[in-house]
Amino acid sequence: MMTTNREQSPSSVNTSQRSPQHQDDLPVVEIFDDNELLYRRYLLAHFIDHQLVPQHFQFPRPSFNRSKFSQPEDVLHPDCCDGKVLEPGWGVLECFASDACVSTQSHDDRKLTLRPKHRPLPTCYAHSELWCFLPDGTETKPSATVREKLRIKLSNIKFNERVPAIA
């Protein structure tokens, strides 16, 4: 069950005096540690009866920040929001990268699995996305039906609230 804190949270003020790590000339790091966390911003509207709604996850590649290269609040910083300053009310969820590796079957009975890939942005080195793969490691674009199944599975994984959102 997700609890929310109605008091002012860091998401309602300038959350980070420092800037998130920029890519500069740093390499892509494809390996995710077993205990590595993924951070994702959210609003209270992304929950119904304390359950994360599947539509919160946009495809083709839902985005997160890696804990290896960021702090939870970095997902709220303009450098990790395409330059946008977010309105008050955003919070941060976290989950284990391994928990985000959800799978489902396609209409032709192929197993499709989401796995995190490190995809740094110029001003947000920690930026990562969930990509869909076939068992042989080939990336694939999931059909609308498979995307919906994957959204539902993602919405059911264990997320912890790192920065509470406020109304």
Image: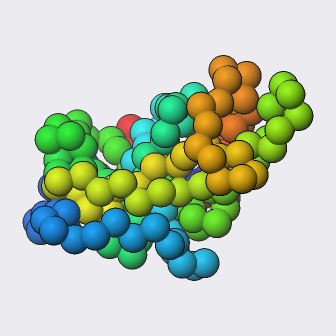
* Any part of residue 138 in sight: yes
Say which residue appears at 41% left-offset and 55% top-offset: 128
Q: Is residue 65 left or right of residue 11?
A: right
Looking at the image, is 10 positioned above or below residue 83?
Answer: below
Q: Quadrant of residue 27?
A: bottom left
Residue 24: x percent and y percent? 13, 65
Residue that lies at the very extreme toward the right in this rendered image: 109
Q: Is residue 93 left or right of residue 100?
A: left
* Any part of residue 153 in sight: no
Residue 67: x percent and y percent? 41, 71
Q: Is residue 41 left or right of residue 96?
A: left
Q: Quadrant of residue 143?
A: top right
111 or 9: nearer the eye? 111
Q: How many marks?
A: 0
Q: Quadrant of residue 98?
A: bottom right
Say which residue appears at 39% left-offset and 70% top-offset: 29
Say which residue appears at 46% left-offset and 67% top-offset: 30
Q: Is residue 71 left or right of residue 34?
A: left
165 or 77: nearer the eye? 77
Residue 156: x percent and y percent? 71, 47
Say which residue appears at 88% left-offset and 34% top-offset: 109
For the C terminus, give its image quadrant: top left
Q: How is the image coloured?
A: rainbow
Looking at the image, is 166 positioned above or below residue 120?
Answer: above
